[in-house]
Amino acid sequence: MTVFSAFSAMIKTTLNMDKYADTDSQWAAIEGSWPGHPRIGFDVQRRLLLALLILCVLTSLGLLLVLGIVQWRDLHTQAFLAAERATVVAKEHADKVFELDTSLSGRVGDLLAGMNDDDIRAKQHMIHLKLRQMIAGLPQVTAVAVIGKNGDVLAHSRDYPFPPLSVADREYFIALKQGKQESISSVVVGRQMQRRIFTDGVARRGENGGFLGVILVSLDPGYFLSFYQEMLPGEMHQSLSLVREDGAILVRYPKMVNDVSNVSASSPLMRGIGANALAGTTTGISPLDGERKIISYRRVANHDVYVVSARSLSHLWSAWLSYMVLAGALLLVPSGILCGIIVFAIRRVKDQKIAWQYWRRELALRHRAESDLRESQKFEALGKLLGRVAHDFNNCLMVVTTGIQIIRLKRVPGVEKQLEAIERSIKSGEQLTRQLLGVSRRQPLKPEIFSLQMKIPEWQLLLFNTIGAARCYVDVDADTWPVCVDAVEMQLALINILLNARDASTPDGSITLRTENILRRSAGPRQGYFVCISITDQGSGMSEETRKQAFDPLFTTKEAGKGTGLGLSQVENFAKAAGGYAEIESAVGVGTKVSIYLPAAESAMLAERDERSLVAAAPPLKPLSILLVEDNTDVADGIVTLLQTAGHTVTHLTGAADAEDFLSQRQPDVVISDIHMPGGITGIELAKKLNLRFPALPVILISGYAEDLQAAIKDGFSVISKPFTLDSINRQLAAQVR
């Protein structure tokens, strides 16, 4: 099969050109006889273009993927570096602040050296002034306080005299009293100042190490916020925080919507500090806002405080997507143009392939048409030859038939047996002429009423010999109604079905022919009394699609050269011509049943019986004056003698021109004319002229040439087919003159 088989099948289905099912084989024959025909590798071109298109798309996607990976790594690296840089700067700032805080605490300690609580109370005013002087110019420090060993505020840089106040319950005081040298508190609201602060407390101890009190430096979180804001102006995807070692948040920029004051021990930050207490960078989900972040931290020198920088990865992802959109757009323009050019080229190849297929199909169809024309010319010539032979043979049979009838009318004794044998031979000759005319396709339907109980046994040898009589079963119902059909066409239809059943069955598969009476009560044309003739095989069966096309002309599933596709089409045409229809029931692997439904002929039999009774009841036909126009003298002599024996007066002429001259002088009762005559004027043309000149003059046309009979019937003339009997001609004469 060639690469165009699928397209050919589509064209055949679309245009209903099943008779060109062998286009590929015809093209193969053309290719063999045409060495220089063009060969174009459309499929190769299409595959190459498709490969180029796929390569272009994959290259663009690959390049975009590489750019995406590189950009993601760059963004990730930059984010890590940005977080670490921010942490380093913030750590240096915190180191300076807490270094000043430590220095301030040392100076206050030197001021209080050798003093106990009572001494401090006694010198409160002097200490207040000194403390106030010490913190001047330190914006990060809000106040400095001296706490006694019992937690009472002994002196304060903000107020003098300072009202009685105890901080003995504060966590930092408790921690320092218990032995810790330094303690940074969480963010609290000062009881005296009523503002948010966190404190850096240093224990005062005597020479023996005893606890003397606390030097408390209050730091302003806002100072750190201002610095962090300057570092991250408008940056909402990065944060800076000051976090105590235990996770308490002292400062955070930007401020959180929800007031979270502690970082859980399971957070990525606290796990990182646990792994490396000095510095580190990690990633994880922040418990503060639930986002995945890059977290960088560093410990403030000599203090339990960490500077933390966190950068959101969602922002990183958004930046990466923005870059990919831009890169994709820039790649899309050249890639899209290239892909468009390739797609256009593919469509051009497709169009060229379709044009090539059309050209190839048209060439194959032309080759087939020329072959069909030559075949039809042969059949036309053969048909004309066979038609002429059949016509001449019918004339011979007419001579014999009239001779037998004349002998019977003269009642010659002792020849009855021989006459019957001659009549049987005449019937066989009539059958032969019908078959010859059938081959030449010039045979009109000749319906007759008969019973299948009588005909099928007579046809059994003809029907079953070609398929094997041993495998065939016949079931003809004894009460089967008679039918009115062309017997020869019916034989041909049954043979076509049986041949298909044989080809579809295994050599030992049975084939059954069955008849039955059917009464259709459904509304529509398929209602009434029918005789069903079905042939069932046990072959391979048909698919539903094949079954629907089985009656289509020239449709066949057989191999090339083994089927014409005309068999089942003839079956359906025969059934329709008879006033019935045909059906197929089939299942793959089960078998096929082909049924022909023919109208029951009860009404036709009644009509024929009534006609015969009317003819029998009618008065005898009076002798008539008849003009016979027949070019064959042997046929004419027989017809003249037969009609004269019946009491008629007959004048015989051999041509239409002589008949016209005769009718100009005298007019008979009836004109009987052969149709096919020499001289340029046919019997039909003569009848038309006579109808114009003598409208009341009956004309009966006779012929053994079926094509002439069809033309005469079409023009509305009464006809009799050769050979005919005296009874049939008398019935026509009676019908014409009454």
Image: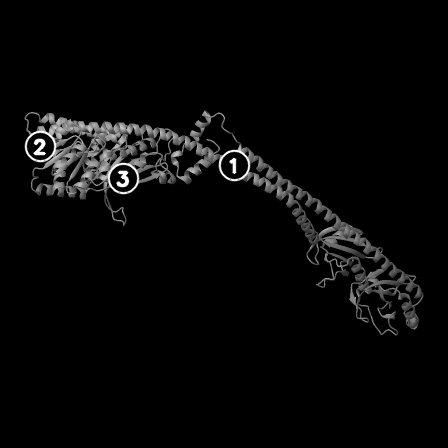
Q: What's the amino acid at mark 2?
A: Gln
Name the mark on residue 575.
3
Q: Is residue 590 left or right of residue 628?
A: right
The Cα–Cα distance between marks 1 and 3, rounded to whole angstroms, is 47 Å
Residue 136, percent across and down?
89, 66
The 10 Å Cα crowd at callout 2, few under 14, some 14 to 19, many 20 or more, is: some
Q: Name the colouring of the figure.
A: one colour
Dot 1 falls on a residue whose secondary structure is helix
Residue 432, percent across and down?
22, 28
Q: What's the amino acid at mark 1?
A: Gln
Tell whether label 3 touches label 1 (CB within 8 Å). Answer: no
Residue at the disc numbered 1 = 352
| Residue drawn at the location 72% of the way across and 46% of the way down | 73
Name the mark on residue 332.
none
Q: Is residue 255 left or right of residue 50?
A: right
Viewer-nearest residue: 485 or 208: 485
Give the number of the mark in front: 3 or 2: 2
Dot 2 falls on a residue whose secondary structure is helix
On the image, which quarter does residue 601 sit in? top left
Q: What's the amino acid at mark 3?
A: Ala
Give the number of the mark in front: 1 or 3: 1
Residue at the disc numbered 2 = 644
Q: Is residue 277 left or right of residue 625?
A: right
* Sequence order check, earlier mark of 3 and 2: 3
* Sequence order check, earlier mark of 1 and 2: 1
Q: Quadrant of the C terminus?
A: top left
The Cα–Cα distance between marks 1 and 2, rounded to whole angstroms, is 79 Å
Dot 3 falls on a residue whose secondary structure is helix
On the image, which quarter does residue 513 sit in? top left
* Sequence order check, earlier mark of 1 and 3: 1
